[in-house]
Image (cartoon, rainbow, N blue to C red):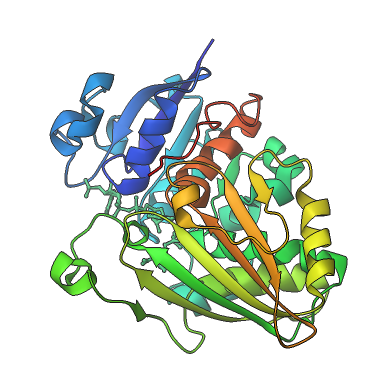
């Protein structure tokens, strides 16, 4: 029996990516699609590229019969998500793609997002959705919080190195490049073609990006002491992809060995041969992460570059990987497609 899936926020970019992935997933079937301003419209009119799937029309959340649903993906903006999830049936399995349930401490949430949380109990119940590091908890969870796409990329790069003790915890620099679809489908001036193409800029400079809340929480937990990284995101004039260049203090060969050991049995994570560097071209449209390590002319320093697709492994692919575990399906089901190239 295939599992019946609802997608709340189906008219957004991550919603469309969930539909694309579920379309060829043998264990899942789309039962309901919800939106806000586009409720009442056909999916063909919102996303003509999905026409052949004969999808149900978009409805409002309250029109969904959740008794028929095995799992709901919630792909709504921050803050809206907690208000919607709070009112869903308490037995429903949910994978939330927003930031609302990522931070365990309500005070940390308020510090980074500027408002008091509307569902603190559920915030405590939620499991952090970085699959490779929270597999057992995710399998048993009812509510899983998908990670930020920058936060996922940075963690795939650094977590095994903290665990192996091969880097200086006070000298971690994450230089992140995030594609424009990371900002969602809503209209914003800085995302207009004329203001985005042929240019390149940093944003949230000076340690102000809210994904630092995730880095602080996860790295400090892992290290058993406060770890603060330097992290600056850049708006990359491309549709999909994240590239993280990490500047680290440690022996490059030891760093490479630690990453190889940590990810040896991970189906989605490829550690490249020493000295090779990844490209967003090589993971586009896939659930794979590529990680490459090189040394530096300054001894005792290393550069680790990682790439993933923000709409796939950075959000919707990760969400399906987690849902597979929550539903008792094989973890990689529906996710082994090769990247799109060129
Ligand atoms: N884009 C990315 O790479 C990543 C995104 N995320 C997170 O995933 C979530 C979805 O992102 P994304 O798909 O890019 O966002 P989009 O802006 O593309 O889509 C947002 C969706 O939420 C719906 N929506 C907006 N306001 C409301 C409301 N008040 N009530 C109900 N529904 C509402 C929209 O419906 P309608 O169109 O009808 O208005 C639309 O379906 C966000 O929290 C985002 O931060 C996480 C990781 C990566
Ligand atoms: C280009 C761009 O704006 N990127 C987004 C990344 C979005 C993401 O990772 O998701 P969440 O919004 O769910 O945290 C940003 O930096 O905020």
Q: Quadrant of the C terminus?
A: top left
Identified at 61% across, 27% down, the residue is 327
Q: Residue at x 81, y 72 (%)?
A: 223
From the viewer's perspective, is residue 200 above or below residue 336? below
Image vertical order of residue 1 relative to residue 54, above or below: above
Q: Position of residue 274 (x, y in %)?
A: 73, 61
- Give the quarter the ligand 2 occupies: bottom left
Question: Is residue 280 visible to the viewer in this orientation of the structure?
Answer: yes
Q: Where is residue 8 in the image (x, y as percent from the top left)?
A: 35, 40
Q: Position of residue 20 (x, y in %)?
A: 37, 32
176 vs 304, nearest the viewer: 304
What count of labels does the image hold?
Answer: 0
For residue 337, above or below residue 25:
below
**Residue at 58% from the left image edge and 57% from the top image edge:** 123
Give the residue displayed 78% in from the left and 72% down from the top.
252
Q: Is residue 105 left or right of residue 137?
A: left
Where's residue 106, x and y in %? 58, 69
Can residue 102 be seen at all in this image of the molecule? no
Q: Nearer the viewer, residue 138 or 269?
A: 269
In the displayed structure, does residue 168 sit left or right of residue 114? right
Say which quadrant the N terminus sits in. Answer: top right
- Picture quarter containing residue 88? top left
Q: Quick check: 131 left or right of 162?
A: left
């Amino acid at each position: 029996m295939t599992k019946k899936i609802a997608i709340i926020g189906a008219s957004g970019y991550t919603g469309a990516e969930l539909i694309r992935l579920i379309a060829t997933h043998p264990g899942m079937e789309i039962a309901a699609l919800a939106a806000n301003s586009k409720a009442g419209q056909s999916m063909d009119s919102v996303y003509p590229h999905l026409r052949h799937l004969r999808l149900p029309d978009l409805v409002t959340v309250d029109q969904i019969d959740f008794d028929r649903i095995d799992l709901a993906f919630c792909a709504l903006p921050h803050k809206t998500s907690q208000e919607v999830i709070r009112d869903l049936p308490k037995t429903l399995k949910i994978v939330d793609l927003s930031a609302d349930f990522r931070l365990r401490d309500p005070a940390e949430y308020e510090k980074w997002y500027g408002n008091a949380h509307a569902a603190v109990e559920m915030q405590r119940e939620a499991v952090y959705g970085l699959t490779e590091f929270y597999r057992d908890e995710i399998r048993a969870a009812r509510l899983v919080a998908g990670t930020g796409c920058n936060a996922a990329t940075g963690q795939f790069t650094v977590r095994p190195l903290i665990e192996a003790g091969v880097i200086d915890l006070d000298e971690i620099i994450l230089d992140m490049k995030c594609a424009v679809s990371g900002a969602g489908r809503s209209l914003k001036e800085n995302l207009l073609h004329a203001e985005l193409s042929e240019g390149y800029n940093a944003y949230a400079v000076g340690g102000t990006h809210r994904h630092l809340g995730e880095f602080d929480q996860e790295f400090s937990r892992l290290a058993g002491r406060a770890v603060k990284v330097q992290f600056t995101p850049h708006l990359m004039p491309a549709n999909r992809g994240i590239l993280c260049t990490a500047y680290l203090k440690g022996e490059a060969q030891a760093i490479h060995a630690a990453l190889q050991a940590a990810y040896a049995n991970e189906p989605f994570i490829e550690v490249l041969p020493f000295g090779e560097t990844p490209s967003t071209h090589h993971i586009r449209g896939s659930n794979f992460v590529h990680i490459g390590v090189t040394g530096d002319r300054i001894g005792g320093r290393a550069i680790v570059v990682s790439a993933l697709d923000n709409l796939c492994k950075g959000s919707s692919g990760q969400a399906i990987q987690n849902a597979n575990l929550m539903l008792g399906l094989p973890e990689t089901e529906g996710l082994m497609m090769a990247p799109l190239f060129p």
